[in-house]
Image (spheres, rainbow, N blue to C red):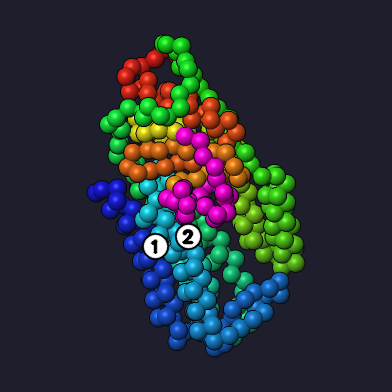
Amino acid sequence: MTIRTRAVLLGAVLPGALLAGAFALVLSWRDRLPDPMALHWGVNGVDRVGSFMEHLLPFAITSLVICVPSIVLALVVKGAARRGMVGMSAGLAAMMAGIGVGITAIQLDAADAYSIGTPGATIVLPLLGAVAIGILASWLAGRDTAAPASSSVPDDAARLPLPEGTSAVWSRPLPTGPIAIPIGAFALLLAMAVTFGVLTGDWWMLAFPALIGLLFLLASGWRVQIDRTGLTMHGSFGRPRYHVPASEIVRADVTQVKPIHEFGGWGMRVGYRGAHRGAVGFVFRAGEAIAVECTGDRRVVATVDGAAQAAALLNTLVERTRSSSPAE
């Protein structure tokens, strides 16, 4: 099975099937649901009710708004980031399908909407399941087949003079925003979850700050490294990891990045307009960045201080790997 086929099946067909199946299942339960249905829960239980369509339409619209962009990204993104996009697409669809089915299932054959308990497990379990499905889909998506460059680094690409027979390693942290912002958001979410647990006795909302905290830890402390193996970006704990092998690098240059205008924000993103359209971006600030052109019409952009030196060294090391294996 080709990489493209896997991306289509896992990143588009599977999410579509999960959402369609959940939608069909909820529709089949219509005659077994109370009228009106529970639409929202507060600290004292159900605090808003409505018709079946008021329950179904928001579920359908929200699912489309959240899942369609990730499905598109899973189909268009190339390179190592493709696996992440496939996993995200499958995971988000699984989450929305699970929550939609779950908050409907707890209302089956209920005599009155206000007698329905809190939907704790029906929200937590889909979240955990979505993470597992996303990881599995990412793994099953497989690695791209090697696509080595067939030509040397262009003559007009910058070089960094290095003594013959030697190599070098360049490493630097990617700039990040103020650490107080994500920590403050996490603390606020945790306080809300604890307050909800104290007032209701239901502690399932603690799953949200726990998941957000885990994601924050995994995604923090990004660092870029350039050596004879190519270009590597990784988080504080070594994962997530994004690697571009030297054999697939065409050239590296310095560029300027406008996060909002070209990438729609900050973080690990895909360029959608301008010179960086279609590029995988590690965008944490505006300004100077290293731009790496790879085989297969792939590009990687990373905002990092000292981008000129990094690009020149990468070109030099890539050129050397094409002709010899320098000693460390």
Residue at position x 41%, y 60% in the image: 71
Magenta extent: 253-278
Q: Determine the CA span between mark 2 and mark 1.
A: 8 Å
Residue at position x 42%, y 42% in the image: 299
* Quadrant hosting residue 293: top left
Q: Amino acid at mark 1?
A: Pro
The crowd level at tag 1 (other Cα within 10 Å; few <14, some 14-19, many 20+) is many
Residue under label 1: 15
Q: Is residue 311 above or below residue 79?
A: above
Residue at position x 29%, y 39% in the image: 145
Along the viewing direction, whichever of 142 and 124 lies nearer the viewer: 142
Q: Is residue 264 magenta?
A: yes
Image x and y of residue 135, in percent: 44, 49
Q: Is residue 259 magenta?
A: yes
Residue under label 2: 92
Q: Are marks 2 and 1 in contact (CB under 8 Å)?
A: yes
Q: Is residue 318 above or below residue 42?
A: above
Q: Is residue 36 above or below residue 56?
A: below
Instruction: Determine the secondary structure under disc 1.
Output: helix
Q: Amino acid at mark 2?
A: Leu
Is residue 215 at least partly visible in the picture? Answer: no
Image x and y of residue 320, in percent: 37, 20
Residue at position x 57%, y 54% in the image: 260
The crowd level at tag 2 (other Cα within 10 Å; few <14, some 14-19, many 20+) is many
